[in-house]
Image (spheres, rainbow, N blue to C red):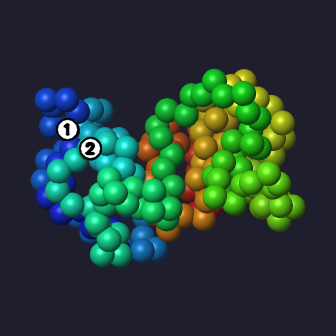
Amino acid sequence: MLELDQLTVKRGALTVAQSINAKFHPGKIYTLLGANGAGKSSLLKAIFGELAFSGNIRYHRTTQSKANLMSWRKPIAYMPQDSHTDAELNTLEVVLLGRMDALGRHISDELMQEAIELMAQLNIAELAHRPIRALSGGQRQLTMFAQALLSCPQILLLDEPVSALDMRHGASNQSIT
């Protein structure tokens, strides 16, 4: 279970989330709703460890801290709202980054097949060898979603996951997880 205890997140002097208490149970899907600028993205970034906060964030009784940030992130995949990148990678390489821990000098045939199958499920397999920087916003968003899913996370933090998708992709991707 992921628990937020008196979580407060600030951006400079501005408090964007204050005294949040919540429990998120395994196997459930939760949605954060709020107006633009309400702090939804900041809250997700704090949970992932990208933004400073006060209060406590716990997962399976382990409290997030600067000292354990790398191990804290292992069971979590985070897909940011903005997936713009100028990286010199193709789409398949970006998806494979979801399993950086398994990447070495050689990518196994099994991992490659898993990535390609996931891309096919998301209808982006034909983009595998196109540069990520050449994709549309929706195609980049699907690529980042594939990257997040490939990591086999226990917690999947998706920041506006369908904002750049057409209606067909937005509806179909809700059934993949």
* Residue 17 percent coordinates (x, y): 19, 44
Quadrant where the C terminus is found in the figure: bottom right
Give me the residue at 15% from left, 37% from top.
Answer: 15
Q: Residue 127 falls in which quadrant of the image?
A: top right
The N terminus sits in image quarter: bottom left
For the residue pair 131 and 177, the one nearer the viewer reads as 131
Asked if residue 58 can be seen in this view, the reply is: yes
Q: How crowded is mark 2: few (under 14 residues within 10 Å), some or many (20 or more)?
A: some
Q: Looking at the rendered structure, which numbered label has been put on residue 167?
A: none
Identify the residue under disc 1. 10
Where residue 50 appears, as percent x and y from the top left, is 37, 44
What x and y, as percent, mark residue 85?
Answer: 60, 28
Q: Where is residue 21 in the image (x, y as percent from the top left)?
A: 18, 62
Figure quadrant of residue 3: bottom left
**What secondary structure is found at the residue carrying circle 2?**
loop
Q: Which amino acid does label 1 sit on?
A: Lys
115 over 59 or under it: above or below: above
Residue placed furthest toward the right: 109
Determine which of the numbered discs, if any, sits on residue 52 in the image: 2
Q: Is mark 1 on a helix, strand or loop?
A: strand
Task: Using the numbered discs, state the Cα–Cα distance from disc 1 to disc 2 in whole angstroms.
Answer: 7 Å
- Identify the residue at image location x=17%, y=56%: 55
The answer to which of marks 1 and 2 sits earlier in the sequence is 1
- Front-most of 45 and 104? 104
Q: Residue at x 45, y 62 (%)?
A: 71
Q: Relative to 95, say whether 176 is above or below.
A: below
Horizontal side, residue 71 vs residue 147: left or right: left
Viewer can see residue 24 = no
Q: Residue at x 31, y 42 (%)?
A: 51
- Dot 1 and dot 2 residues touching (CB under 8 Å): yes
Q: What residue type is labelled 2?
A: Ala
Question: Label 1 crowding class (10 Å Cα cut-off): few <14, some 14-19, many 20+?
Answer: some
